[in-house]
Amino acid sequence: MEKSLIIVESPSKAKTINKYLGKDFIVEASVGHIKNLPKSKLGVDVENEFAVVYENIQGKDAVIEKLRDRAAKAKAIFLATDPDREGEAIAAHLADEIRGVNKNIKRVMFHEITAEGVKEGMRHPKKVDKHLVLSQQARRAMDRIVGYKVSPFVWKTVYYGLSAGRVQSVALRLICEREQAVKAFLPEEYWSITGEFQTSQSEPFLAKLMKVTGTEPRIPDETTMRGYLDDIQKQKFEIKSVERKPVKRNAPAPFITSTLQQEAARRLRFSAKRTMMLAQKLYEGVVVGEEGPTGLITYMRTDSTRLSGDAVAQVREYIFDNYGKEYVPKEPRLFKKGKASQDAHEAIRPTSVKHTPKEMKKHLDKDLYLLYELIWNRFIACQMSPAEFEQLSVDVVGGEYLFRATDQRPLFRGFLQVYDDVAEENGGEKDDVDPISKLPENLAKGQAAMLRNMIPRQHFTKPPPRYTESSLVKELESLGIGRPSTYAFIVSTVIDRKYVEHTERKLFATELGMQVNKLLVQYFPDIFNVKFTAQMEEELDTIASGKQLYVKVMKDFYDPFIRALEKVEKNAQKIKKSLQEVTEVPCEVCDRKMIIKWGRNGRFMACSGYPECKNTKPLAEDAEKHQHLAGMKCELCGGDMVVKSGRFGTFLGCSTYPACKNTKPISMGIPCPKCKQGDLTERKTKKGKRTFYGCNRYPECDFASWDKPVNLPCSNCGSTYLVQKYTQTKGEYLKCPECGEEFEREQMAVVA
């Protein structure tokens, strides 16, 4: 009997689906995309209606041949790639390759990899959606045009090897503008006053000064504050009002892609990229005991908070059985659709309430479990009753001064039994808050209140907080930039390019990032801006819905872009010179002035006589880092060895160059742990993309480490050095390369 062929993207998903469909089907994986735009050329014919040229991805010929062979023998072919635009494009490319051997091709979508989810998808086969394919193609073509045409301009003006992406550059702009706001911010002093009061029937309580003569007080300095204190002490106080009112707090909506990334970053310290990688595994399926491969969550790239009727019915029953009747709302909760939501998929939820986190823990590694538990708890909570509180507000008045105290008392925890939704403000920074206290029960209107004490506190206004991955994703979503499938890529790209540093969970624009952003904003103001990029996202959506044609959207994008590019390219050399800073420092070789330029490893000084004179040296502030090398002599000619800069970083070179061309790497001051004779140095790979650390006696000694060595011994096993490590969950820490013992940053001094 002939079998049908199902093609999915990942091998792990293939195993899970194979289990559900049985012997009448063969399930194979394309292992992601099989085609891409060519690396060596643009691949978009701008003169011929923006036609694209795809090539087989290197190494995929064997996969394609295998799929063609299986398709030729199959009864029917079902393309079951991921249910989004990217998956639709992969399905289209697979169809192009297979159509020559079997035309019986259908497109199916699996929104959850469960027995019912797969069967539901198979019950509704359809054709590949050409509108979705063209929408993805337009995004790809736009990104390729920008990358291949703007990047060379950045190379000419800053240095070779940099790149500029259409959407990522707008994300960089947001980060740089926030960096500028932080650096330009001037803090302003202000004071607050908290009074400690007590009635004859109550315990002491605290209340904050809220109004003076009916308006909010402005206390800009200590002198003003002391004036208020003197006058307040003269007043007689009484309780003006005691207001009690019930307050309800509803559970948050189930996760969509952006909110999952935000919460995983905030609660679990996962990067957006890691969150999506783990979510993909949970969606495709993990081995669950005798069940075998099982998909644990629905599709994780979605902008919809919609839930299926079956899922809601199941979770309401689960809540009733496990928490009680009072925790189940009378009606299922529905959530408002976002303005930009495509509503193509359900929200992210567990595929079955039977797979509780407690049951799944033994089948999942630590990070998979933590993410699954987060998704589970949010899903259960979203259909639970609201939390209920009694809010108590007390006003204490004396003369023109009104002090207020508020307190909130829980009456019914509701969804908080499962999911505490209290958010961290300001990217995790602690606010300088005024002291608070619990309010006594027996306060009543008209009671005299004795002022026992006053607590003045000095504050300073704070700059806007730097973005975290979480808050940047939230901002991109609110501005309409990017879509669920692109958020993680946008964030990781600006970090990978070294335009942004991720330190202590905050995104800092680097000097290089600021320079590239300044260049792009100055010369492409109408292209690399929020409004234009958000508008292009909307245009891509109109292609997906069939409302606009691919060629028109591409033309709307390309025409203003190419005009701006042609204008600036004429002045590339002039722009490059404007970025260089002429110094008064003379060149040691030819006595001409040194200029400050950009290179792969940051700014450095180079002779203005280049290419006749190729002398380079680090900036003064960088040279200070290498003061311990002062006085080193060249072993070939006896001249002084000086720190120089090159395309692969700093190094030691003879000061008599070009007469003597002796060079050597800069020692880190750590003896080689392998040969005990050489010193460790920082080095670059052949293409200069990665840094590693090796012995300066190479090739006699082949010691190498990707992790940065630190000159501290291990207190556990006695290893002569530790290495520096960093993860999203742990932050920066030290680890012994021999025994694996880990040391937190706070332990460094102790270990030393």
Image: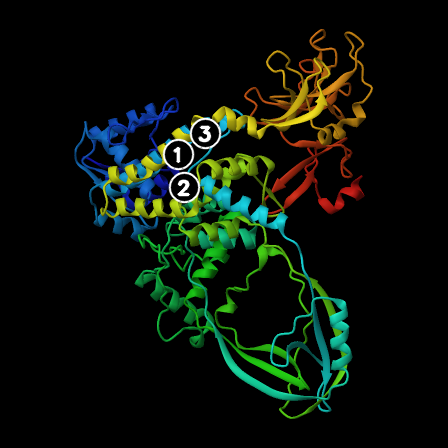
Q: Residues within 10 Å of mark 1 (few under 14, many from 20)?
A: some
Please say which color scheme the image uses: rainbow
Residue drawn at the location 73% of the way across and 91% of the way down: 200
Where is residue 225? Give x, y as percent.
Answer: 74, 72
Judged from the image, the secondary structure of the residue bearing numbered disc 1 is helix
The residue singled out by tag 3 in the image is 151
Earlier in the chain: of badge 3 and badge 1, it is: 3
Mark 1 vs mark 2, CA separation in Å:
8 Å
| Number of the label disc, if any, that sits on residue 564 | 1
Tell whether label 2 touches label 1 (CB within 8 Å). yes
| In the image: residue 58, left or right of residue 505 | left
> Which residue carries the number 2 mark?
526
3D distance between C-alphas at marks 3 and 1: 14 Å
- Which amino acid does the dot numbered 1 rest on? Ala
Residue 93 versus residue 395 in the image, above or below: above
Q: Between 450 and 555, which is closer to the camera in this rendering? A: 555
Q: Residue furthest bottom?
A: 446
Considering the numbered disc 2 on the image, is that residue within a helix, a strand or a loop?
Answer: loop
Relative to the observer, which residue lies in front, 115 or 457? 457
Q: Which residue is drawn at 39% across and 39% down?
A: 12
Give the left or right position of residue 188, taking residue 339 as reference. right
- In the image: residue 29, left or right of residue 244: left
Mark 1 or mark 2, earlier in chain = 2
Q: In the rendered structure, which disc, 3 or 2, sits on the residue that comes first in sequence?
A: 3
Q: Judge whether 719 appears above or below 637 on screen.
A: below
Q: Are marks 3 and 1 in contact (CB under 8 Å)?
A: no
Kind of residue indicated by mark 2: Asp
Q: Quadrant of residue 5?
A: top left
Instruction: Locate residue 216, reporting x and y percent.
Output: 62, 74
| Residue 641 position by quadrant | top right
For marks 3 and 2, give the one nearer the viewer: 2
Crowd class of label 3 (few under 14; some 14 to 19; many from 20; radius 10 Å):
some
